[in-house]
Image: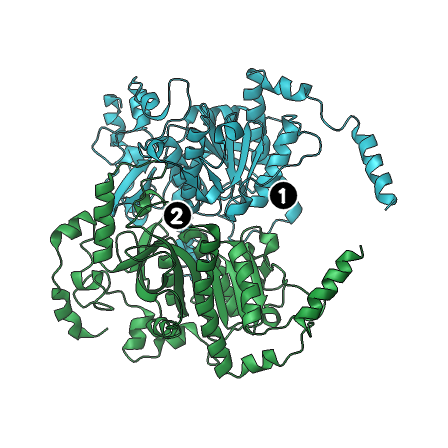
Chain colours: A green, B cyan
Amino acid sequence: MPANNTNECDYEYNSEETLTLNVPSEYCDACLNGSTDSCSNGCLNNVKDVEEDKEAGGDAVKIITRYADGSVKLRNPNIELMDQDILYHLALGSESHDLQEMFGDVKFVCMGGTPKRMENFAHFIMNEIGYKLPAGTQLQDISAFSYRYSMYKVGPVLSISHGMGTPSVSILLHEIIKLMYHAKCKDPVFIRIGTCGGIGIEGGTVIITEEALDGHLRNSHEFTILGKTVHRPAKLDKKLARELKSLSSADDPYDTIIGKTLCTNDFYEGQGRLDGAFCEFSENEKMEYLEKLRDFGVVNIEMESSIFAALTHYAGIKAAIICVALLNRLNGDQVNSPKEVMNEWQQRPQMLVSRYIRKVLSHQGQLKSFYSQHGSIKSPRRFKLVQQESQAHE
Amino acid sequence: MPANNTNECDYEYNSEETLTLNVPSEYCDACLNGSTDSCSNGCLNNVKDVEEDKEAGGDAVKIITRYADGSVKLRNPNIELMDQDILYHLALGSESHDLQEMFGDVKFVCMGGTPKRMENFAHFIMNEIGYKLPAGTQLQDISAFSYRYSMYKVGPVLSISHGMGTPSVSILLHEIIKLMYHAKCKDPVFIRIGTCGGIGIEGGTVIITEEALDGHLRNSHEFTILGKTVHRPAKLDKKLARELKSLSSADDPYDTIIGKTLCTNDFYEGQGRLDGAFCEFSENEKMEYLEKLRDFGVVNIEMESSIFAALTHYAGIKAAIICVALLNRLNGDQVNSPKEVMNEWQQRPQMLVSRYIRKVLSHQGQLKSFYSQHGSIKSPRRFKLVQQESQAHE
């Protein structure tokens, strides 16, 4: 990391805020403020990591996480020595399934909380990229027999549910990264599509995460490995975030912004809500906290970003997080918008992801090949009529 | 808490272990060793909490968490002032649903990871307690429209999936405790039915958790509330644990034991597995860690116990955790037992819970009333014959 960041560490930070927010002393002000990517001031952000190696001009990132052909390499020497690798929570195995045949063409791994949302996304993206299924087939939940996550595949796109909270995402990412390795996927991009609470922004706003912060506002995720505390930077690909932002349209009837995302381990007390089973703070204390988050640059709160950023970054995988705000937390705690409105809002991050995937596929000439495929339906109007006729003759 | 515990704090503890395991200095040796419930030695375990109040002979626990009739009282003054309370993740609301009519008779809240296991448990317990559904009805997933958790109700028993990891359990417990309050449930008992990795015990062994430990071997769960770190004791009801143990039978072809449970935030690195996407420790270091856990009294590792114990304890709810070990981690990382064997193993904690529920209901005379109800089936043999005849005439 560059040595000339030292001056930025002199950034003035209100010491009262530091106290109230319980900001750890091991992070310096500039790093907490996000004004520098890594720090020479001796704070915790001074972690030697892949990204820094890359910034320093080295090819360390590629050597560690990619083979020469761009396919995913694991930071674990044990896997290639194993007879078989069972991906329990996906109901897949390296010797029971031909993972390269099944998943070798995957370029985009999209994840979100619920099986329902990710099933919907699979159908949505299928239509958007013009991907045709063979006659007499339908999408199948590949991981149905794990009873834990749902996974759908639409050509180069995987659509997977990750459940709620960082541990659930952690299990999934370990197995999906191993899946990318077994399948020899080349430079896959991971995108989390989520919902969140907004801080000072209205419901329906689309937020692209600039960096993920943990509950103590550190731009890292805390792991406990063999009983020891390990911090890994929770960094996302800034270029990808800007590219996604550039795909928002002036015609969109909502804002798309880039900002810091706070990741918590709880929905109620952990996000300063007054309406959990327990609450021992006042509305004033809550508002003071939320306003401090806002002043710190936090635009939204959710429960998965820090682990998603930390594990993808550690694996050298280009990743982004796009959420839609379901409410402005500065105005209240309970989500009161009608279901139809919320459903429309949840489409918005999906639409942005679709624009990105279409753009990349289009550049690679693949979109054209999808659209040139013949599907089952020649005329949607006549198709509907035939269905209705058929139903009437039961 | 009793002052005569001071001597127990002199318990000798190997300082090297302390270092390696990253045991926090704010916990004294006796408390870490579990040889005292709470401590006068000034360590973190000296948290003023409900259980201690109870032990001290006070009625503080009842005043805080129960109304005079034994129904659940919330440690949050805001809820009773709200127009309506939406339990988002359960697809229920205090004004949209008559929660007292629906759930007022609930006595046992059973939780486990996957929707599938908890649907199976609902059918299993229905048969075990002889509960009859009205003609022409079947069990329905009450929370189906939340797309997050599944919930089934069989008379006095709720069977709910909680997903994987502490944040997922946290959201559910907040809403279930609020549900108990809205429904005016009296002294409900919460039981987690899970799977785990054993430490020095064979696959198929049933483990009742004595106390839950976090990744740093603290008998507490760490919360971040308004940016501040808060520890809450991760205590379970010891009397209930002993009662459950007493219901194991000498005829059971497996052991049922009581011991300490380690709760981690990750399945791979967090549990010292060599087969995740990342691994930066050697097999020797892993074995050293697992053996230290064993020497510390840890008999199993899972991912939900600390939050389950901490939140139920804080709510003054009697709770227990019963898991079956899927493997002995001292022998390896991957689970290799055949599916049929694993399915049979997963029945074991359910059978213990059934014995407990039957015993309590029997004492209350309720079991008799269930069995005296007329169900739809007079003769299972003839019922089957009629079904087969009917199928043949399609």
Image check: B140 left or right of B190?
A: right
Mark sitting on residue A335: 2
Q: The residue under label 1 is which amino acid type?
A: Asn
Q: Quadrant of residue A248?
A: bottom left
Can you identify the residue that label 1 sits on? B343
Discs 1, 2 touching: Cβ within 8 Å: no
Disc 2 on helix, strand or loop? loop
User: What element does badge 1 sit on?
Assistant: helix
* Label 1, label 2: how far apart the Cα atoms are: 40 Å
Q: Image quadrant of residue A204?
A: bottom left
Residue B298 is situated, as x and y percent measured from the top left of the image, at: 42, 39
- How packed mark 1 is, by other alpha carbons closer than 10 Å (few <14, some 14-19, many 20 or more), is few
- Write the residue at 30% across / 74% down: A53
Dot 1: chain letter: B
Count of numbered circles on the image: 2
Say which residue appears at 56% left-offset and 20% top-offset: B361
The one of A73 and A77 positioned closer to us in this rendering: A73
Name the residue nearer the viewer: A32 or B325: A32
On the question of residue B75 being in view, the answer is yes
| Mark 2: amino acid | Val
The vertical placement of B73 against A273, above or below, is: above
Residue A3 percent coordinates (x, y): 17, 74
Q: Is residue B114 above or below residue B4?
A: below
In percent of width and height, residue B341 lies at 64, 44
> Toward the viewer: B125 or A54?
B125
At x 21%, y 31%, the residue is B41
Residue beneath the point at 59% across and 18% down: B366
Say if A285 sits above or below B352 in the image.
Answer: below
